[in-house]
Each structure stands twice: as structure tokens, then as C-alpha cells.
Amino acid sequence: MPKLRVHNITVSLDGYAAGPRQSLEHPLGEGVEEMHDWMFAAMRDLADGKTGLDVDFVARSEENIGATIMGRNMFAPHRGPWQDESWKGWWGANPPYHNDVFVHTHHLRPSVPMEGGTTFHFTDESVETVLARAFEAAAGKDVRIGGGAATVQQYLRARLIDELHLAVFPKLLGSGERLLDNLGDGVDGYRVSELVSSPAVTHAVLVRR
């Protein structure tokens, strides 16, 4: 049965997945750039055919993915109504998804087809409806939540996530957007299935019981 999966969400020791004041210059917020160095290094190593623990987790994040879900904050640094429709994401003409991507937003706009098979769809529907659309688009494969923290929280509160991979970076951030706040009983029923460390981060995988 297809799953809803979350991969490579890097959090600080005090639980922050994004820094404050996201902007064009700081896509993940201020003060968090080094937290994601492990992932970018692993992506380069994977492309070069190298192996390692971090590389394994990055490779797993791409396996059997047929559609992607993300929040408005992950797609764009802008808030409120779109000033125009020129912004098409951070990733250039050929984004790395190569599938249908459903973007949660209160401000709708037409779908944006990109090179390489990625199409961004903008939706203000419920998480249950968006997930159903994503599973349909995935055609039997799994669906991945790309981020950000608020979107992951929505799906955790709805108890829809089957697998959640966190990479814990050894830094106290002190401010920003915490991943596991405001969940109520949304984390009930999960267990840690893996807990392993590389020199860069500690990987924790949570799965539904």
C-alpha cells in the first residue's frame, strides 16, 4: 500500500527546522545554512557514485516517489497574494522533483509545468483531499512531503504520515520554526525504527506502529 513519507528534515538540537526571517537571500531562514551541509554533500557524493550513511539516507528519499506535497513557504519566499506569476520556485527550469507537486497556499494560481516532468499545482484544499490527489497522481507509488515545518505539522496532526526521517544537527538555534510543536496527540502511535549517526548528523526514523 502506498505511503506518505517525509525525508531529510534537518532539525537543530532544540528542535528548529527553519530559522527566522525567511527571504530570497535566506531560503531556509537566517542562521541555518550550515545545518543542511550534510545533505548537499551527500547529494554530491551520490551523484559521484560514492557511498556512506548520509548518502544512503539521501538515496532512500528518492526511491519509489510518485508525487510531492509542500507548503507555500517551501515554494517561495513571498507571503500574501502573488504579485505576479513569474516566480516558479527556487530550483530553476528543471526542478529536482520530476513529478506532480501540490503546493498548499491560500492564494491560488494556475498550475506551472516545468522541464523534467515537474508540475506545480496550487491548492487550498484540506490535507486529506490533497493527499488523495497526490496518491492518484503517484499512480501506486509513495508520496513525499518536501516541507516545510508547518506542512509536516499539518499532516502529523492529521495522523497521515507513515514514515518521518529527521536529521538532528548538533547546534542550538534558539529561534525560528520548531518542527514538533503544536501537535497535540499527533505524534501518538509512532516509534523510532532507526537511530544512527554519521560524523555530521544523527538520523532518526519514526514510523507508525
Image (cartoon, grey):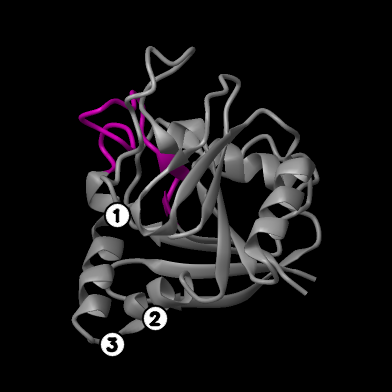
**How packed is label 1: few (under 14 Cα within 10 Å), some, or many (20 or more)?**
some
Query: At 25% from the left edge and 37% from the top edge, which residue is drawn?
Result: 31
Q: Amino acid at mark 1?
A: His
Residue found 80% across the figure and 55% down from its top: 188
Residue that appears at 23% across and 86% down: 49
Quick check: is 23 in the magenta stretch?
yes
Q: Secondary structure at mark 3?
A: loop
Identify the residue under disc 2: 56
Name the kind of residue labelled 2 in the image: Asp
Q: Is residue 198 visible?
A: yes
Please report whichever mark, 1 or 3, sits nearer to the chain's N-terminal start.
Answer: 1
Nearer-N-terminus badge (2/3):
3
Of residue 168 and residue 21, the one placed in the foreground of this image is 21
Residue 131's place in the image compared with 142, above or below, is: above
Front residue of 13/91: it is: 91
Residue 192 quadrant: bottom right
Could you say where residue 145 lies in the image, as x and y percent from the top left?
56, 53
- The residue that mark 1 highlights is 36
**Above or below 7: residue 28:** above
Could you tell me the amino acid type at mark 3? Thr
Please give the range of residues in magenta: 9-32
Marks 2/3 in contact by CB < 8 Å: the verdict is yes
